[in-house]
Image (cartoon, rainbow, N blue to C red):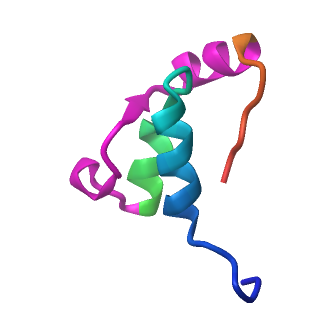
Amino acid sequence: VLPNAKPLKYYIDNLLDMGDVEISACEFGMKVKGIREEELIQGVKISGVSEFALKSSESKGVLVF
């Protein structure tokens, strides 16, 4: 963690406020990590692996973590 860095949620909220941004969570990855839908921040969409791959190939930029 960088000192004085803002939390990730700050940057995600700013991206969502820009309007032309979609944030997706991989359904399979969520199951593997034990993440429930209600734990996601508002505005995040759940996608299957094939949908995620298609959207990634059509996107200007992709951030995966």
Work out which quarter of the rendered image holds the N terminus and state it.
bottom right
Give percent across and percent down for residue 40.
34, 52
Q: Nearer the viewer, residue 50 or 59?
A: 59
Q: Nearer the viewer, residue 21 or 14?
A: 14
Which residue does the image show at 77% across and 19% down from the upper left? 60
Segment colored magenta: 34-57
Q: Is residue 44 magenta?
A: yes
**Residue 55, located in which quarter of the rendered image?**
top right
Q: Is residue 24 visible?
A: no
Residue furthest to the bottom: 3
Q: Is residue 56 left or right of residue 36?
A: right
Give percent across and percent down for residue 11.
58, 54
**Residue 6, located in which quarter of the rendered image?**
bottom right
- In the rendered image, the vertical position of residue 14 relative to residue 54, given as above or below: below
Q: Is residue 42 magenta?
A: yes
Work out which quarter of the rendered image holds the C terminus and state it.
bottom right
Give percent across and percent down for residue 56.
69, 22
Q: Nearer the viewer, residue 33 or 19?
A: 19
Give percent across and percent down for residue 47.
44, 27
Q: Is residue 47 left or right of residue 38?
A: right
Q: Nearer the viewer, residue 20 or 50?
A: 20
- In the rendered image, the vertical position of residue 30 relative to residue 50, given as above or below: below
- In the rendered image, the vertical position of residue 17 relative to residue 50, given as above or below: below
Which residue does the image show at 28% across and 54% down from the upper left? 36
Which residue does the image show at 57% across and 18% down from the upper left? 50
